[in-house]
Image (tube, rainbow, N blue to C red):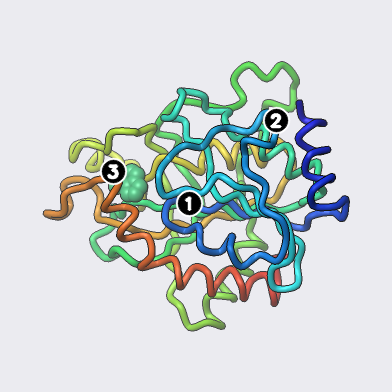
């Protein structure tokens, strides 16, 4: 399976190694259109997830962005789609096979901090796996015992902070909690997560970070805050609301990512 997706990509996009992968979250798909390269529908990549969530564009785009050869995933598979926490194993394994040493994940998230508002961006420093699920359950080798200290690569985080500063965009930092979804959290769960030390909550990213570390990729992640978490404001949470609010942060995030690619991706 892995070989055939790899062959499919190489026959369409050439064999030149990819430097970095980028996964685009809800409402953040715009960047894929800026890549000078080829867009391959997930359906043409054997073993790829169907990634059928509205607001995601299920294409893998391989080509040049700001002078670097990148692989941009226009959609991700979420645990809540089919109950498989390893749904992104194949795409992330493919990234490694394409030669990428780094992965940047983006997502839409709810804020748990009264001082972090919709439209703001948060660089992940760490995470809490509130779902209890793990994509490496069933992996039979000792490689499953992945060290998660500094899972969010310090050098990539520094480079992203510097890119944000150069663009004069505020980049908050905090801990992301993975909630399985697809229902939103209850207000009591949000109060619990705040006590536990989370700053933002969302339904993705954590399994991908675990998989990326398993494959030896260095990883960084940025949330665009689309709402205050359940019970923290009068907003009614919905997926339409998430998609409507994601563009607030998306333009800023795109500027940061372009600067990061241009200047320094964290040596
Ligand atoms: N909870 C979970 N996932 C989310 C949220 C939220 O409040 N906002 C965007 N994705």
The mark nearer the N terminus, 3 or 1, is 1
Q: Secondary structure under badge 1? A: loop
Q: Residue 261: in sight, yes or no?
A: yes
Residue at 69% over, 51% down: 218
Judging depth in this view, the residue of 1 and 146 nearest the camera is 1
User: Which quadrant of the figure contains the N terminus?
Assistant: top right
Residue 248 x, y percent position in the rendering: 35, 68
Q: Nearer the viewer, mark 3 or mark 2?
A: 2
Q: Which residue is mark 1?
A: 25
Disc 3 residue: CB within 8 Å of ligand 1: no
Element under label 3? helix
User: Percent position (x, y) of residue 80?
Assistant: 41, 30
**In this image, 263 relative to 112: left or right?**
right
- Earlier residue among tags 1 and 2: 1
Secondary element at image label 2: loop
Q: Residues within 10 Å of mark 3 (few under 14, many from 20)?
A: few
Q: Is residue 208 above or below residue 168?
A: above
Residue shown at 63%/59% (left/top)? 154
The mark that comes first in sequence, 3 or 2, is 2
- As drawn, is 29 to the left or to the right of 91? left
- The answer to whether residue 197 is visible is no
Q: Is 99 situated above or below 246?
A: above
Residue pointed to by mark 2 = 46
| 114 or 230, nearer to the observer | 230
- Residue 43 screen position, x and y as percent: 62, 35
> Relative to the observer, which residue lies in front, 126 or 101?
101
| Residue pointed to by mark 3 | 195
């Amino acid at each position: 399976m892995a070989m055939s997706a790899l062959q499919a990509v190489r026959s369409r996009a050439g064999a030149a190694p990819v430097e970095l992968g980028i996964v685009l979250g809800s409402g953040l798909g715009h960047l894929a259109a800026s890549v000078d390269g080829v867009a391959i529908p997930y359906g043409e990549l054997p073993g790829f997830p169907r990634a059928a969530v509205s607001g995601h564009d299920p294409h893998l785009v391989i080509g040049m962005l700001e002078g670097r050869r990148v692989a941009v995933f226009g959609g991700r598979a979420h645990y809540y789609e089919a109950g498989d926490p390893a749904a992104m194993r194949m795409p992330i394994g493919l990234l490694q096979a394409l030669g990428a040493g780094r992965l940047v994940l983006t997502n839409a998230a709810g804020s748990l901090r009264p001082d972090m508002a919709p439209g703001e961006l948060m660089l992940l420093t760490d995470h809490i796996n509130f779902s209890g699920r793990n994509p490496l359950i069933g992996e039979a080798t000792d490689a499953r015992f992945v060290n998660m200290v500094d899972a969010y690569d310090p050098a990539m985080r520094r480079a992203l902070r510097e890119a944000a500063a150069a663009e004069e965009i505020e980049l908050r930092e905090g801990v992301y909690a993975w909630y399985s979804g697809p229902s939103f959290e209850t207000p009591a769960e949000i109060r619990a997560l705040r006590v536990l030390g989370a700053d933002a909550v969302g339904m993705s990213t954590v399994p991908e970070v675990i998989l990326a570390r398993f494959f030896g990729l260095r990883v960084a992640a940025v949330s665009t805050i689309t709402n205050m978490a359940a019970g923290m404001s009068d907003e009614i949470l919905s997926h339409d609301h998430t998609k409507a609010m994601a563009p607030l942060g998306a333009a800023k995030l795109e500027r940061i990512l372009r600067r990061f690619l241009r200047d320094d991706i964290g040596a």
